[in-house]
Image (cartoon, grey):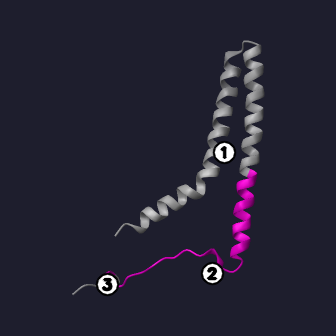
């Protein structure tokens, strides 16, 4: 005889509108994404400036740090933009398990 918790099936269908103020949470997440993109833009501009100053003054350490800041800012923007697709990919992958 199998225990009751092994027999009972559960299901999940995410719906932000089912929560009280679900649209407010969606708006908050959208705003956080916007702030993250603005921070990425600032990091890219500052990193590019540091890279340029380091390259023109032949300061290789400063040029390296600026180049790294540009790459990190670009990767951050890429992740912010791809975040919904990444989350949905893994969610749908998880639905296929079992």
Residue closer to the observer: 3 or 91:
91
Find disc 1 in the rendering and name its residue: 77
Disc 2 secondary structure class: helix
The 10 Å Cα crowd at callout 1, few under 14, some 14 to 19, many 20 or more, is: many
Q: Which image quarter is the N terminus in?
A: bottom left
Determine whether, in the image, residue 81 is placed left or right of residue 32. Answer: left
* Mark sitting earlier along the chain (2/1): 2
Q: Which image quarter is the C terminus in?
A: bottom left
Residue 21 on the magenta span: yes
* Mark sitting earlier along the chain (3/1): 3
Determine whether, in the image, residue 6 is placed left or right of residue 51. Answer: left
- CA–CA distance between discs 3 and 1? 45 Å
Q: Position of residue 51 (x, y in %)?
A: 72, 24
Q: Where is residue 59 in the image (x, y as percent from the top left)?
A: 71, 15
Find disc 3 in the rendering and name its residue: 7
Disc 3 secondary structure class: helix
Q: Which residue is drawn at 78% across and 20% down?
A: 53
Instruction: Looking at this view, name the residue that lies furthest to the left.
Output: 1
Disc 1 secondary structure class: helix
Q: Position of residue 79 (x, y in %)?
A: 60, 48
Whether residue 68 is situated above or below residue 89 in the rendered picture: above
Q: Which residue is drawn at 70% across and 69% down?
A: 25
Q: The magenta stretch spans which residues?
A: 6-35
Asked which quadrant contains residue 49, the reply is top right
Find disc 2 in the rendering and name its residue: 18
Residue closer to the observer: 85 or 47:
85
């Amino acid at each position: 005889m199998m225990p009751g918790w092994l027999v009972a099936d559960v299901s999940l269908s995410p719906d932000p509108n089912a929560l009280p103020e679900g649209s407010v949470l969606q708006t908050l997440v959208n705003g956080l994404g916007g702030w993250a993109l603005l921070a990425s833009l600032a990091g890219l501009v500052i990193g590019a400036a540091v890279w340029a100053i380091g390259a023109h003054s032949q300061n290789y350490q400063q040029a390296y740090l600026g180049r790294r800041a540009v790459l990190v800012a670009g990767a951050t923007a890429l992740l912010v933009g791809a975040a919904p697709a990444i989350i949905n990919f893994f969610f749908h992958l998880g639905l296929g398990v079992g």
